[in-house]
Image (cartoon, rainbow, N blue to C red):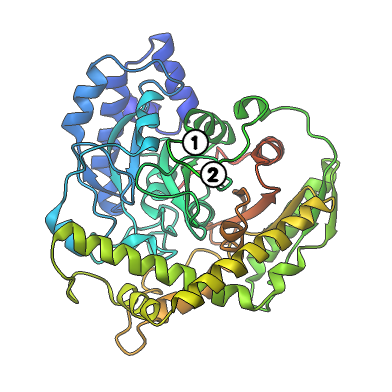
Amino acid sequence: MTSLADDTRWLDATDQAALVASGEATASDLLEAAIERIERIDPALNAVIIRWFDHAREIAAGTLPDGPFRGVPFLLKDLWSHFAGQALTNGNAALARAMPISTSDTTLVARCKQAGFVIAGRTNSPELGALPTTEPLAWGRTRNPWNLEHSPGGSSGGAAAAVAAGLVPIAHASDGGGSIRIPASCCGLVGLKPSQGRITLGPYRDESNLGVELCVSRSVRDTARYLDAVRGPGVGDTVIAPAPTRPYVDEVGAPVETLRIGLLDHHPLGLPVDPECVTAVRETAALLESLGHRVEHAFPASLANPEFGRRFGALWSTNMGVSLERIAAQLGRPLGDDDVELHNRAQAAYAKNVSGVDYAMSLAANVEFRRATQQWWADGWDLLLTPTLCRPPARLGEFDNDADQPMAPMITSSQYVGFTPAFNSSGQPAISLPMHRTPEGLPVGIQLVAAYAREDVLIRVAAQLEAARPWAHLRPSI
C-alpha cells in the first residue's frame, strides 16, 4: 500500500487544491503528507531549514480562506519574506543565532495566506541572496535532488530543491539577478521572474530595486495561478505594472499566434557557454519553429555592452552595503567578521568606495540600458530565447569563500549566470523552462524573455512548450 505522502508527492498545487475542494482530502491530510516527506527526504537535501509544523497544523485544522490554493502546503524562502510570529534570518549567521521574530507579514505573504496556502516553514537561501548557489555558513549546503554532489542553484535553491524532490508542489522564490530562474534551471522546474512592479514588495522594500518575487513550481498552470493570486500593487508603490486583460491562468492552453523570436545561443560578451546549454537552446528553437513560430538569430545590441556588468555590480554591492547596515541596526550592534560571510563583507567594503556620484551614474546607466534593451521588443520582436545559465548545475563548493580572494565567489558567479541579470535591470519578465537534460541526467533550462508587462505571452508559449515536450514525468530518484 502507498501512503498519502506517496500518492500526492508528484501532484502539482492545482491538483492538490482540487483534492481539498472535492473533499477527497483535507488540508490537514496534505500537510501531514508534506511533513512526512520533509522528515523522510530532506535530511539528504537540507532544503527546509526552519519549520513551524505545529503552527501549520493549527492553521490547517482551522477555517482557511477560499482561495485558489486552499489547503495546499507551502514554504517561504528565508529571504525578506516576513511572516508574523516566525523567525527570518536571510541566510545570515548573526540573524540565525538571534532568530528575530517578525511582527507583521509582508504583503506577498499575506496574499499567500489569503490564497489558502498552509505555510509550514522556510527554505534555505545563500546569505542575503548574494550567490547563485545555496550554501550559507548559517544553515549549511542544500543539495540538488537530481545529483547530491551538485548545487540546486540560488538564491532560491532551497525552494527549488524542495519542489523538485516533491516535498511541496510549489514554493515562494525571489529574483534579484536570476534567483528564480537559476534554481529552476538547475532543478528542472518552471521559474518565472515577473515584471518589475507586477507584485508589490511592500511594506519593507521598494519596487525600484532589482528584485522581484514569485515562486518555483513543476507546472506552468501552477505558476500562472499563483501569479493571479499575488499580483498587484501595494500601498505606497511607485512602480506598478499594467494589469493583465484577463487572468494569467486563462493563458494556459490558449491559442498562440505566430511569434517572432530572437535566438541567442552564445554569450554576447564572449563568456564560455557549455555545449549542453547551446544544445538546449537550439533544440528549443527547432521545437518553436515546428510549432509555427519564426526564430532568427538576433538579440538586443545592449546585451553586448561591456559596461553593463560594472554598473550592475555597483548597484548590487551598494544594496549589499545597505543590507548589512540594516542587520546591524536590527541587532543593535556593529557587525563582526563572524557575523557576515567574507564575500558579502568584501562587497560592502567595495560599496564604501562607490561615491554618491558613482551610484547616481550607475542608476542613470541602468535607465539607459533598460530603454535600449526594451526598444528591441518595441521594434517588432516578441520573445528572446537564451540559455538560462552558461553551464549545467555547478558542483557544491565551487562558490566557497576564499580568504586570499574575497571576491572569488562573485567572479565565479558572473561567469555562471551570464544570461539572467540583464532582465532584472531591464525590468522585463523572463521564464526558465526545463527543456533539456545532460547525458548524466542533470536539468538544463532555457530562458524566454518578453516585453515589459507581457507575462501573458510567456505563459502562453511556456504552456505550448510544456504540452509539446512534457516534463512532469521526469522525477529525481531521491
Residue at the image point whose x is 26% and y is 60% from the top: 326
* First reached walking from the N terminus: tag 2 or tag 1: 2
Left or right of 178? Residue 151 is: left
Residue at the image point whose x is 42% and y is 71% from the top: 317
**Residue 260 x, y percent position in the rendering:** 84, 48
Q: Secondary structure at mark 2?
A: loop
Left or right of 467? Residue 312 is: left
**Residue 361 x, y percent position in the rendering:** 56, 73
Q: Quadrant of the N terminus?
A: top left
**Residue 208 x, y percent position in the rendering:** 50, 53
Left or right of 183? Residue 284 is: right
Kind of residue at badge 2: Gly
Marker disc for residue 233: 1
The residue furthest bottom is 404
Q: Is residue 136 visible?
A: no
At label 1, counting other C-alpha atoms closer than 10 Å, the crowd grade (few under 14, some 14-19, many 20 or more) is many
In this picture, is 258 found above or below 8?
A: below
| 382 and 349: which is toward the camera | 349
Kind of residue at badge 1: Pro
Marker disc for residue 197: 2
* Label pair 2/1, CB-CB below 8 angstroms: yes
The residue furthest front is 357
